[in-house]
């Protein structure tokens, strides 16, 4: 009896591994890791942008302090972004993800308005620090666009897997559900980098 149980246990482990692999368990885990990694890059690039905001606001304030409403708007938008804890768990919570997306969209809009206002101040446009911040912001916005695209693609692949048979059975068994994604209807607007080329003569 002991030998039979031992023999059964020896066969059971590889059989379970084969079943889990055949039902897409490994694929779901790999794709989940890919989503998490791409999300980390999205957050990293958004944080890079948020870190530029204080210097940008202070530089503009030095030349255009009368634009208080725009400066306050940018500062408040950055504060809202900073108030969201963008942990990997956030990508499993559609409501929290929506708040994150809205906050980042508001900061994008506020920055765009700040840069448009800056057009009216030639001395500001010629300031070396401001020009450097413009270049950094433009580069960061481009990185955000790339990181968002990678995240969108990774989530799409993952969501298709967890909704497809027979992987959907495995996903349900292990609590793997569809992840929220950036809204397509806002993609063109939010992903478009603000215009920061103020070096051209008027």
Image: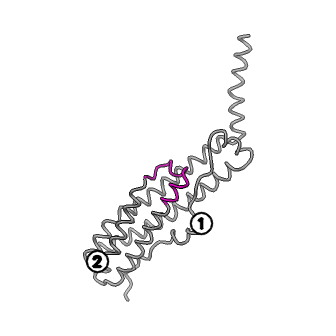
The spot of residue 108 in percent (x, y) is 44, 69
Which residue shows up at 40% across the image and 71% down it?
111
Left-right relation of 10 to 89 = right
Q: In this view, does 1 lie above or below 170?
A: above
- Numbered tag placed on residue 202 in the rendering: none
Question: Main SS of the magenta segment?
Answer: helix
The spot of residue 151 in percent (x, y) is 55, 57
Q: Earlier in the sequence, mark 1 or mark 2?
A: 2
**Distance of mark 1 from mark 2, alpha carbons?**
37 Å
What SS does tag 2 mark? loop
Question: How many numbered marks have been drawn onto this rendered protein structure?
Answer: 2
- Numbered tag placed on residue 127 in the rendering: 2
Which quadrant would the N terminus be assigned to in this image?
top right
The spot of residue 80 in percent (x, y) is 40, 61
The residue lying toward the viewer, choosing from 153 and 162, is: 162
Which residue shows up at 56% across the image and 68% down it?
187
The residue lying toward the viewer, choosing from 127 and 152, is: 152
Q: Is residue 187 above or below residue 3?
A: below
- The crowd level at tag 1 (other Cα within 10 Å; few <14, some 14-19, many 20+) is few
Q: In this view, does 100 lie above or below 2?
A: below
Which quadrant would the C terminus be assigned to in this image?
bottom left
Name the residue that disc number 1 marks: 184
**Residue extending furthest bottom?**
202
What SS does tag 1 mark? helix
**Which residue range is magenta in the image?**
85-100
Left-right relation of 86 to 93 = left
The spot of residue 91 in percent (x, y) is 53, 52
């Amino acid at each position: 009896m002991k030998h039979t149980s031992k023999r059964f246990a020896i066969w059971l482990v590889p059989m379970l591994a084969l079943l889990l692999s055949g039902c897409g368990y490994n694929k779901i885990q790999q794709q989940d890791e890919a989503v998490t990694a791409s999300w980390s890059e999205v957050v990293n690039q958004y944080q890079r942008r948020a870190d530029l905001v204080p210097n940008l606001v202070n530089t503009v304030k030095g030349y255009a302090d009368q634009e208080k409403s725009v400066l306050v708007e940018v500062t408040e938008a950055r504060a809202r972004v900073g108030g969201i804890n963008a942990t990997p768990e956030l990508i499993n919570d559609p409501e929290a993800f929506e708040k994150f997306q809205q906050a980042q969209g508001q900061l994008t809009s506020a920055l765009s308005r700040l840069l448009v206002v800056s057009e009216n101040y030639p001395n500001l446009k010629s300031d070396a620090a401001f020009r450097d911040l413009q270049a950094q912001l433009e580069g960061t916005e481009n990185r955000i666009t790339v990181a968002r695209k990678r995240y969108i693609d990774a989530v799409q692949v993952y969501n298709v897997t967890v909704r497809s048979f027979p992987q959907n059975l495995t996903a349900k068994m292990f609590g793997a559900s569809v992840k929220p994604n950036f809204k397509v209807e806002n993609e063109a607007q939010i992903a478009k980098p603000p215009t920061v080329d103020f070096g051209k003569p008027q």
